[in-house]
Image (tube, rainbow, N blue to C red):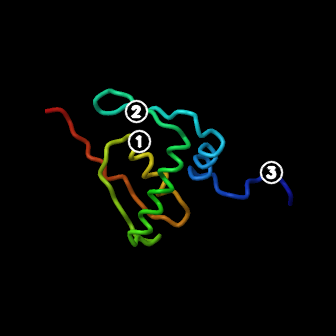
Amino acid sequence: MDGTMMDFPLTLTPILERAGKLFPDVEIVTRLPDKSLHRYSYGDFHRRTRLLAAALEDAGLKRDERVATIMWNGRHRIGFHQTASRPGWNLWGSATPILFPS
């Protein structure tokens, strides 16, 4: 049956790769813990996540191994999650510390 069904899964990877290729100059703005803003583009984001994936593979990480990180919610975490969402990867970044003011 022919229809309009997609021929690939709707995951973050194709969405962000498309943004990196079609809108490389559009800004992504994130707020840092010190309340300042960090700005970079979808093109930079796309390039950095590909570099991280290549670095993990060069370091000997196999696609079925697990990696956990501890990081604040922000641009680095978003980049890690984009890298982790590549097909076959089993990376986890959910070990985030929650600190309460004392």
Of badges 3 and 1, nearer the viewer stands 1
Q: Which residue is mark 2?
A: 38
As helix, strand or loop, the secondary structure at mark 1 comes to helix
As helix, strand or loop, the secondary structure at mark 3 comes to loop
> Residue 4 got which mark?
3
State the image coordinates of residue 11 (x, y, percent, origin top left): 59, 52
Image quadrant occupied by the C terminus: top left
> Dot 1, crowdedness within 10 Å: few (<14), some or many (≥20)?
some
| Picture quadrant where residue 66 is located | bottom left
Q: Nearer the viewer, residue 27 or 99?
A: 27
Image quadrant occupied by the N terminus: bottom right
Of badges 3 and 2, nearer the viewer stands 2
In the depicted structure, whether residue 2 falls above or below residue 77? below
Measure how far apart labels 1 and 2 are at the Cα level.
Answer: 8 Å
Measure how far apart labels 3 and 2 are at the Cα level.
Answer: 39 Å
As helix, strand or loop, the secondary structure at mark 2 comes to strand
Identified by mark 2, the residue type is His
**Which residue is painted at 38% across and 69% down in the image?**
59
| Picture quadrant where residue 43 is located | top right
> Residue 75 got which mark?
1
Sequence-first tag of 3 and 2: 3
State the image coordinates of residue 9 (x, y, percent, origin top left): 64, 56
**Which residue is painted at 42% across and 62% down in the image?**
55
Identified by mark 1, the residue type is Arg
In the image, taking residue 90 as reference, residue 11 lies left or right, namely right
Sequence-first tag of 1 and 2: 2
Identified by mark 3, the residue type is Thr
